[in-house]
Image (spheres, grey):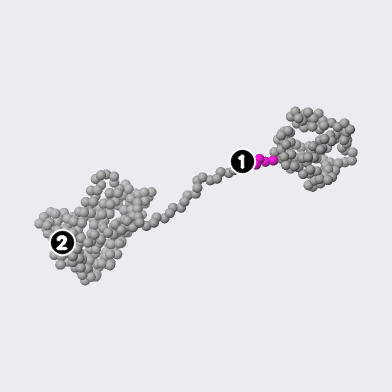
Amino acid sequence: MSVDHSATRPRPLRELVFVAALFLAYKLGRLALTGDLPTAYTNAAHLWDLERAWGLPSEAGLQRTLLDHGWAIRAANVYYAGVHFPATAALLLWTFLRRPARYRWARTTIATLTAAALVLHVLLPLAPPRLLPLAGMVDTGHAMGPSVYGTPGTDALTNQYAAMPSLHVGWAAAVAIVLITASRSRWRWLWLLHPLLTLAVVVVTANHYWLDAAVALVLLGLILLVPTLLPRPVPAQAPDPVRAAPDPVRAAPDPVQVAPGSVQVAPGSVRVAPGSVQVAPGLVRAVSDLVQVAPGPVQVAPGSVQVAPGSVQVAPGLVRAVSDLVQVAPDPVQAAPGSVRAAADPVPLLDAGVWSGRRPCESRGSR
């Protein structure tokens, strides 16, 4: 199983309830599996013979080498009874407080291993070597103490026929792996002594066979390796942080903008047929280069400008010049009779005042 380094510490009360529920389920599950004693003894005899056929060392031979050393047997009994649960609980507490990123991994690994062991307890009930007459081993817990089990057949608190696999060895190996991966010290590999010592203890005390420990280690290895072999989900791609910038070049608005109603002309003074005046492209831009009009609308009060008859004279050349740019529809402008007369000696409309940069309103005719 992989470690989630981004994990945060879970809520203490909820986690305490969760771990306590797992432990209670484990204990109740073991108790619920008792009852098939003939199968448990038969399986134990087959397993003993299988180990001998494979040439594994005799558990009874290892025990006999220590029976003459009472202190060693009593130390093994104490280790078996007093280290299994406290060491696992201490690991969970330490990772919860000091290594929260590894706590969930440790807790989930141990819980998964325990659940897999319960399944095997159902499928393969097994009597331990101390209860198998064929093995010829001594129940050191009852002989020298301390013992964690009652008399077989009357013990209602534990299931003594769930030897396969050895959770003592499995949990000890899980504790060592978590501590090794959580430490950077060069001495961290000494934690491997814990599962090795546990293996020797469970065999010497006649509580497990060699294969009980082997199966527990295989289960733990599968729990740790299988998730790393599975394809990991592809994370969703983040949106592209680089977005196309808006076009920095935008078409400038028409340089001549007349607000609606900004120019007021006396009613009926000028009448233009719809669509009669067409301005060639570029005319407005050409004129705007010559004539600069101050911003803001020009408002002419009705009747404020009076043009005397004959006061406006248009040179013939001017009309021809403007006609090249402005296309006027037939009869586009209707003027009052006699309001505009062409003088014999016309005065050019575009005088020197316009070309010198003065505004049209500054010409002599407007003063």
Q: Residue at x 59, y 43 (%)?
A: 247
Nearer-the-camera pick, 185 or 108 = 185
- Position of residue 349 relative to residue 75, above or below, is above
Regarding mark 1 in the picture, which secondary structure is present there? Answer: loop
Return the residue nearer the eye: 187 or 151: 187
Specify whether 277 is left or right of 209.
right
Q: Is residue 243 above or below residue 172?
A: above
Which residue is nearer to you in this view: 336 or 244? 244
Q: Is residue 320 magenta?
A: no
Q: Amino acid at mark 2?
A: Ser
Dot label at residue 58 = 2
Q: Can residue 154 be seen in this snapshot?
A: no
What type is the residue that disc 1 sits on? Val
Q: Is residue 253 visible?
A: yes
**Label ID, residue 249:** 1
The x, y position of residue 30, in whole percent, is 27, 64
